[in-house]
Amino acid sequence: MSANGPGPGAGPYNQQPPPQQPPMPPQQGHVPPQGYGHPQQPPTTPPGQPGYGYPQHPVPPQYPMAPQQGYGQQGYGQSGHPPQYPGAPVPSARPRKKKTGLIVLLVVALVVLGGAGGAAWYLMVGSATQPLWSVPSKSEWSLSEQEVDGTWFTDKAVVQTLAGGVKAYDRETGKQLWATPLPGAGNQACVAPSVSDGGIGVVAYGASGMGGAHGQCNHAVAYDLNSGKELWHKTFKVKDEFKTGTELALARAGETVVVTTDREQVALKVADGTLAWDVKKVVPSGCQSGTYTGGKNLIRTTWCLEGGDEFTGKRSTEAALVDPATGKSEWSKRFGENEAEIALSTSPLVLSGEKGVFALDEKSGERRSKIPGMTEKYFVHTPEDGSPLRQAAGFGNVFLMGVGERDNVDGESNTLVAYDLDTGKELWKAPAGNTIHYIPLRDTGSDRLLAYVNEGAEKPKLVEFDPKAGAMTTVAEYPVEVNKNMSGGEWPFWHDGVLYVTSVGAGVSGDSYALVALPTTAS
């Protein structure tokens, strides 16, 4: 393969592509909305990743309540009802020199599959916020060139998960370093956690659906992120008769990944795909194998029955901090029925349930605070693919979430809300609007409250919030073309003082970015 991408006539990974139907907007299936809250009108640009507050990928599997069998997590904020307990059991489930004046480089990586292998080009800087370099992308839209969530980093490269496989780009120049397709022909990626401990990335995939939309998702593959070499791939049992592609979740923490489908649940070592531990043997008697959420921590939430059968016994929920290497609980805490259903964030640790949202101390599991009124005031949808909410982040004692306001007279209104994790008190919320999107930046190496802001046809910005009052300061403002040449659904990833923002695909017409680098100076 050429370092600058595939040869003429070849597919994006230098393979001859299988016959495809003509690119077309999705009519059903993967038609994600763009806002934080409740559904909007369909976007005029091609659809991409789900907007804030929306389910990201698979719908959590449903599991009956039977001893030592997995159960499904009803999405809190979806139906609002706890799972039922049918009688028949079903098996479950780089470093960079720091500049004075706090100058950092903001790299916005809008990486898409189509044309992303093209030669990198350099644009001389005309002002502080003009692009430094860029990799061009196709101008036409193709559903088969959608990106999923996985964005990983090595000392030299940023690695993106795309519909047909993974590609690595030099972080200094944007030059393509390698590209590796998914195993088999006609397959499409569906889930990819953004954890890459051990230099390994894991992707779930399956056969493409109609018109390039997601089809059945029932495989997983692991890649060496330094070389692009495939390490292993496996097939998993799924029910999913209608092949909606929403039945698999990957909870990745450390060098372990817990794979959950509607038919099975296994914990695997990411290095070789072998069994790490038995999910059914690490939970207390009377509890199900549960729902796992990855990230910095591996959190299990599960249902339990005490003192009787499903009709007479006491129902409760349990949350546990799990050692990814062994599956053993470092601590576990019991809560009331429907109380601890799923983790919105695993660091800081914030749980959600039918009775509301609350924070726990990560080290001890002790209750840190209750966050009253969150679900009554805002749309809060739970993560569904095994990863924590991407629009949530912690900065010291402050917890930020991009949300949609309920009962707003002007229709949907998106905002960023801040909570004190020690008291549960709402501190402030950012200016709201039906086109504005706030994305808090994680892992910045400081407690500065930084966020990437995209507001319709306006110029995108890097902003900073005052922790106490919420006053917003613009750190950098970028040309409107940066937003115009993105297809929507962009998500930022901060790594070693660099911000990478991924986008779902090429624009509808004109030039579009596959990879663009933007500088910024923080005062």
Image: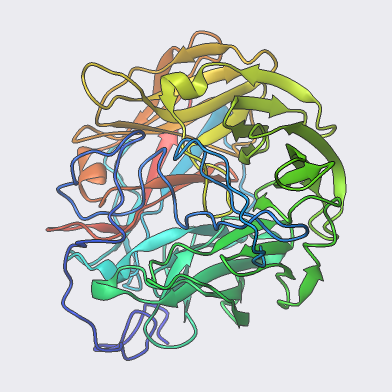
Measured from the top left, where is residue 55 in percent x and y? 43, 47
Q: Is residue 115 visible?
A: no
Above or below — where is 131 with respect to 118? above
**Residue farthest to the left, as pictured:** 509
Q: Is residue 506 visible?
A: yes
**Residue farthest to the top, as pictured:** 469
Above or below — where is 382 with respect to 191? above
Name which residue lies at 51% across and 57% down: 151
- The residue closer to the viewer here, 137 or 172, is 137
Measured from the top left, where is residue 393 in percent x and y? 56, 33
Above or below — where is 515 with respect to 13? above
Q: Is residue 139 left or right of residue 341?
A: left
Q: Is residue 334 left or right of residue 261?
A: right
Q: Is residue 480 left or right of residue 421?
A: left
Query: Which quadrant of the structure image shows residue 313?
Result: top right
Measured from the top left, where is residue 299 in percent x and y? 72, 46
- The residue closer to the viewer here, 228 or 306, is 306
Query: Which quadrant of the structure image shows residue 24?
Result: bottom left
Measured from the top left, where is residue 417 in percent x and y? 47, 21
**Residue farthest to the bottom, as pictured:** 16
Name which residue lies at 48% across and 19% down: 465
